[in-house]
């Protein structure tokens, strides 16, 4: 087994999240610390050092076995790893790469967080089969990242791919960046909040006041999702307008980049993706200019909070080893022995267990029923597999309930139920992000 590891660090406005990662992309452990308000260089460097120390000491890995540390910054980072500007942190004009290389005495890579999120998805998530990816991440603001032929686009000074700040209406509302009518000024959560509050002030009624409380202090993505599910008139209208802008933005971006894939992520997409992705797909299909070209895939990110951290790791090794970006090989090795037992990493499995899409072997909290519903599948399908294999021993029988099947369909997870030996073969041969349940 390799004794080399990487550390990926996602520096955010409220927390700094770090992970210890094997070269194959297995996350061995993660830690997070709060970002102090108005954090400057000293604070951030201190927290990064603390993260590296606590991750290495907890897993008893000497610092010399850390092959590199990747750091994602919410701001503009130039091609030499110098932070040019960060709206929410005081890191502007800091040669962070130099400072950290000296302190940590290892290879250091620094990049923009959303760019790295797209690179992370390219390595281990939804973007594995794509070479050219346009990533849009609507959360509070709207982040963007573009990966072309496995490299993310930085531009001359590191400020490329700010897709949220494309002007879509020069007479539109003011944006957080100071310009008018940016995509973010319609699609960012803050922008939708602005429109919903204005309508409430005019006397319009909406269940959003029941969901988030009087005065509507903040509308989280989950509240938007609930209101959309309840077909609330106001939220449906405001959200619909935002999605229309986003869809036309994607048509323009398709003309600029002609990507294989649009990758959508971020809080709003995680909560409300089913109301967004089909509309983007439809707009791309309708485009008369590109009607003779294949329509790019429109997919939802799969790595959640780990995407940026894993992308920071990918940044460090991709400087010398681009091929590693094509591999998904962190799954444990499986074998069947002569008497029909399955061996995971050489150990006989004797109870019902499953391997998640991130390669971790788990046991269900409760004994699984023979009819698997969405409750059981949610746990097994954590970490977003594309394929779920259910492996049956000679004596076990299992069915998936209608609710379970509906869950898999909604998450676009393919299901295969197979006898143990064939299941192990199928799992080993698959190229997808996959999970397997050994129902013994
Ligand atoms: Zn803007």
Image (tube, rainbow, N blue to C red):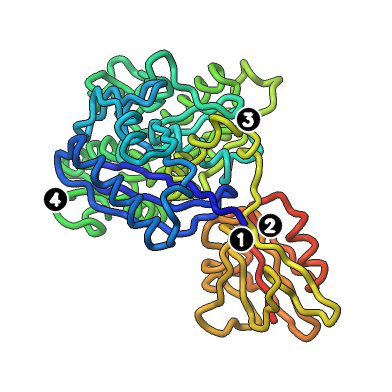
Q: Which of marks 1 and 4 is nearer the N terminus?
A: 4
State which tag comes first along the sequence, 3 or 1.
3
| Residue found at the far right of this picture | 338
Q: Which residue is drawn at 49% across and 51% down?
A: 21
Residue 288's place in the image compared with 140, above or below, is above
Label 3 sits on a secondary structure element that is loop
Assess whether mark 4 and mark 2 are in contact (beta carbons under 8 angstroms): no
In the image, taking residue 301 as reference, residue 69 lies left or right, namely left
Marks 1 and 4, how far apart at CA: 38 Å
Element assignment for label 2:
strand
Q: Distance between the residues labelled 4 and 3?
A: 46 Å
Between discs 3 and 2, the one toward the N terminus: 3
In the rendered image, which residue does mark 2 sit on?
A: 414
Q: Position of residue 150 (x, y in %)?
A: 59, 29
Specify whether residue 286 is in view.
Answer: no
Question: Which quadrant of the figure shows ligand 1?
Answer: top left
> In the rendered image, is residue 297 in sight?
yes
Give the residue pinned by disc 1.
Answer: 408
The residue wearing badge 4 is 215
Q: Where is residue 301 in the image (x, y as percent from the top left)?
A: 51, 44
Residue at mark 3: 131
């Amino acid at each position: 087994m390799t004794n080399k590891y990487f550390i990926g660090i996602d520096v955010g406005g409220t927390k700094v999240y770090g992970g210890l990662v094997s070269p194959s992309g297995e996350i061995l452990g993660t830690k997070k610390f709060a970002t102090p308000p108005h954090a400057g260089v000293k604070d951030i460097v201190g927290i990064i050092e603390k993260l590296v120390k606590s991750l290495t000491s907890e897993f008893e890995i000497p610092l010399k076995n850390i092959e590199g540390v990747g750091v994602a910054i919410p701001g503009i980072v130039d091609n030499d790893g110098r932070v040019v500007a960060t709206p929410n942190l005081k890191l502007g004009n800091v040669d962070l790469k130099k400072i950290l290389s000296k302190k940590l005495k290892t290879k250091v890579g620094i990049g923009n967080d959303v760019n790295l999120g797209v690179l992370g998805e390219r390595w281990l998530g939804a973007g594995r089969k794509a070479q050219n990816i346009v990533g849009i991440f609507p959360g509070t603001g709207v982040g963007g990242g573009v990966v072309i032929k496995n490299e993310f686009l930085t531009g001359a000074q590191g400020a490329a791919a700010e897709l949220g700040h494309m002007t879509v209406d020069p007479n539109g509302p003011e944006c957080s960046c100071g310009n008018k009518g940016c995509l973010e000024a319609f699609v960012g959560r803050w922008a939708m909040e602005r429109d919903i509050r204005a309508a409430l002030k005019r006397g319009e009624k909406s269940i959003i006041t029941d969901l988030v409380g009087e005065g509507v202090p903040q509308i989280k993505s989950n509240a938007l999702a609930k209101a959309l599910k309840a077909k609330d008139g106001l939220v449906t209208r405001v959200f619909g307008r935002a999605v229309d802008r986003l869809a036309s933005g994607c048509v323009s971006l398709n003309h600029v980049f002609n990507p294989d894939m649009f990758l959508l992520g971020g809080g709003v997409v995680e909560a409300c993706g089913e109301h967004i992705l089909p509309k983007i797909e439809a707009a791309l299909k309708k485009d008369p200019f590109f009607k003779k070209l294949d329509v790019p895939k429109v997919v939802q990110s799969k790595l959640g909070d780990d995407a940026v951290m894993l992308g920071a790791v990918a940044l460090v090794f991709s400087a010398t080893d681009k091929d590693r970006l094509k591999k998904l090989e962190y799954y444990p090795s499986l074998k069947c022995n002569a008497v029909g037992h399955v061996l995971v990493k050489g150990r006989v499995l004797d109870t019902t267990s499953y391997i998640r899409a991130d390669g971790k072997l788990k046991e269900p909290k409760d004994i699984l029923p023979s009819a698997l519903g969405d409750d059981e599948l949610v746990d097994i399908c954590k970490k977003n597999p594309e394929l779920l294999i259910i492996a049956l021993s000679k004596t076990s029988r299992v069915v998936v309930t209608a609710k379970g099947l509906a869950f898999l369909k909604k998450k676009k997870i393919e299901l295969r139920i197979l006898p143990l030996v064939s299941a192990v073969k199928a799992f080993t041969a698959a190229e997808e992000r996959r999970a397997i349940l050994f129902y013994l």
